[in-house]
Image (cartoon, rainbow, N blue to C red):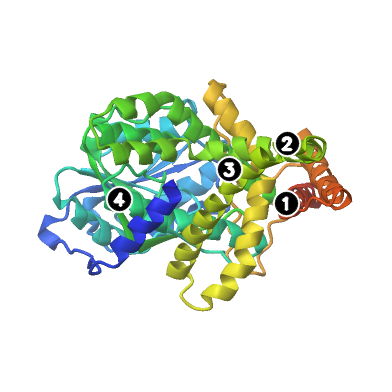
């Protein structure tokens, strides 16, 4: 229901007269600090630094902080590039800490304390922001209560593989329907960790960057909005980034996002529900913070679906009760509409053919990741702590680019991969059992689950055995 409502809000917002991007006069341009939090990013760090110093912005009003916690040759690469741009007159600093305490949140906190700018823009290592990023975002801070302006993520390597296409498909829905829908309703939205700009006073007022969750961005976003700060989302301003190309890298990112969201829900949900906001906004916040919990319910429903075939066979009197679950089909149609509208917005040409090829596979892979993501959510809700695991970057933007030889990808055996393979076989058994019992009600569900888990198992093992 939440996604259906967001879809309705998005359609309603898009029917309004299109908002033109504002402009700001040159004499009113404020001092801006660009923060680049990095850790062992030797493949992409030069690209990132060069892209931000190329901003169309007065050099005397721009500060760049490379917040470097690296432990490898990335340190030397950054030092050389920083020196190069310093010699050309740029205020760019190579910021090193004594320890990596707090990971990304700790680096941002350290940098914010010494930042000169009234506004702070943040970019992760895999981003290549456009030159006019600041000129398009800063005018929206005319409203003194605006604390953040977030832009939509683009994709440098969307067409590299099936995996990158599926990631782009899911992210595009978030950066259209979800962010615009919540924003238009006045509900809480979130800074997405990168490709956005903060008012420094907002960060300080909200309590600063904190390291007790894996999603420091979502955490600070909620604290700021509960203090009354307004967040602006710009769908029409795109900030391109590189998508992970290997299943292990996707998993590490998914783990951090899902566990961090659960940790943030544990930290803030009750407070949000007590905050003086509308009931509708509380409902949106509830589903927003607990969104990742869907993987827990999906996993348990999937595992129990096969025993349910025997229950229906041996207890016909319960069949009516079991069939009531078909009301969940309404949820499926809601999700389909949600992704269809998002696809229409992003893929303006060949929308239908693109959707029918990508959407079913997207659902299958999402199901296949349910074990991995459910464990992350459970850990987060129960308060189990784990370190911040970075997502390896590859500097892959063209089809001919190769990831083999990347020093950040390690060969490692993971029992979870075998369990995913086992579940793929488990749901194949469900298909066979449904045929044997002549009960076809869950057949499509079991087919999608088997495809999903076998695909996740295949891509995980393939990445491992391909590493030299």
Please state the horizontal and vertical placement of residue 283, each as a whole percent of the image. Answer: 36, 38
SS type, badge 1:
loop
Q: CA distance from mark 2 to mark 3?
A: 41 Å
**Which sits in the foreground, 400 or 301?**
301
Residue at the spot of label 3: 254
**Which sits in the foreground, 425 or 37?**
425
Q: CA distance from mark 3 to mark 4?
A: 24 Å
Residue pictured at 53% horizontal, 78% vertical: 350
Residue pictured at 58% horizontal, 58% vertical: 395
Q: Are marks 2 and 3 in contact (CB under 8 Å)?
A: no
Residue 390, above or below 197: above
Residue 183, label in figure:
4
**Which sits in the foreground, 358 or 147?**
358
Q: Are marks 1 and 3 in contact (CB under 8 Å)?
A: no
SS type, badge 4:
helix
Please state the horizontal and vertical placement of residue 446, each as a whole percent of the image. Answer: 75, 50
Residue 283, above or below 459: above
| Nearest to viewer (mark 4 / mark 1) | 1
Q: Residue furthest left?
A: 27
Residue at the spot of label 2: 317
Ranked by sequence position, the earlier of labels 2 and 3 is: 3
Residue 120, label in figure:
none
Q: Are marks 4 and 2 in contact (CB under 8 Å)?
A: no
Residue pictured at 76% horizontal, 41% vertical: 420
């Amino acid at each position: 229901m939440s996604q259906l409502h967001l879809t309705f809000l998005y359609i309603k917002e898009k029917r309004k007269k299109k908002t033109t991007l504002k402009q700001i006069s040159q004499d009113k341009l404020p001092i801006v600090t660009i923060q680049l939090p990095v850790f062992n990013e030797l493949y992409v760090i030069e690209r990132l630094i060069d892209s931000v110093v190329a901003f169309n912005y007065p050099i005397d009003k721009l500060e760049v902080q490379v917040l470097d916690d690296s432990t490898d040759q990335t340190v030397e690469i950054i030092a050389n590039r920083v020196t190069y741009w310093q010699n050309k007159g740029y205020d760019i600093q190579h910021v090193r800490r004594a320890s990596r305490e707090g990971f990304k949140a700790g680096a941002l906190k350290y940098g914010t304390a010494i930042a000169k700018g009234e506004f702070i823009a943040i970019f992760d290592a895999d981003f290549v922001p456009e030159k006019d990023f600041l000129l398009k975002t800063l005018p929206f801070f005319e409203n003194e209560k605006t604390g953040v302006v977030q832009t939509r993520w683009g994709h440098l390597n969307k067409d590299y593989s099936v995996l990158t296409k599926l990631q782009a498909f899911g992210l595009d829905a978030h950066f259209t329907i979800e962010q615009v829908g919540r924003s238009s309703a006045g509900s809480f939205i979130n800074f997405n960790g990168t490709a956005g700009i903060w008012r420094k006073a907002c960060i300080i007022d909200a309590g600063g960057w904190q390291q007790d969750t894996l999603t420091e961005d979502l955490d600070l976003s909620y604290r700021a909005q509960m203090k009354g700060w307004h967040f602006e989302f710009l769908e029409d301003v795109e900030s391109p980034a590189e998508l992970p190309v290997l299943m292990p890298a996707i998993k590490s990112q998914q783990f951090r996002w899902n566990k961090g969201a659960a940790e943030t829900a544990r930290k803030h949900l009750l407070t949000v529900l007590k905050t003086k906001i509308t009931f509708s906004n509380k409902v949106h916040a509830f589903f927003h913070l607990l969104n990742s919990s869907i993987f827990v319910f999906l996993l348990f429903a999937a595992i129990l679906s096969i025993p349910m075939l025997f229950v229906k066979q041996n207890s016909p009197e319960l069949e009516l009760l079991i069939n009531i679950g078909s009301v969940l089909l309404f949820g499926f149609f809601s999700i389909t509409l949600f992704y269809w509208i998002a696809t229409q917005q992003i893929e303006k040409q060949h929308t239908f053919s693109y959707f029918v090829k990508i959407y079913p596979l997207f659902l299958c892979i999402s199901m296949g990741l349910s074990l991995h993501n459910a464990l992350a959510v459970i850990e987060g809700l129960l308060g189990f702590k784990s370190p911040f695991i970075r997502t390896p970057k590859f500097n892959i933007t063209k089809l001919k680019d190769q990831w083999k030889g990347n020093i950040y990808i390690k060969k490692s055996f993971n029992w979870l991969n075998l369990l995913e393979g086992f579940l793929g076989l488990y749901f194949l058994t469900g298909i066979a059992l449904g045929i044997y019992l002549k009960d076809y009600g869950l057949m499509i569900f079991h087919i999608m689950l088997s495809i999903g888990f076998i695909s996740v198992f295949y891509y995980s093992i393939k990445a491992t055995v391909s590493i030299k």
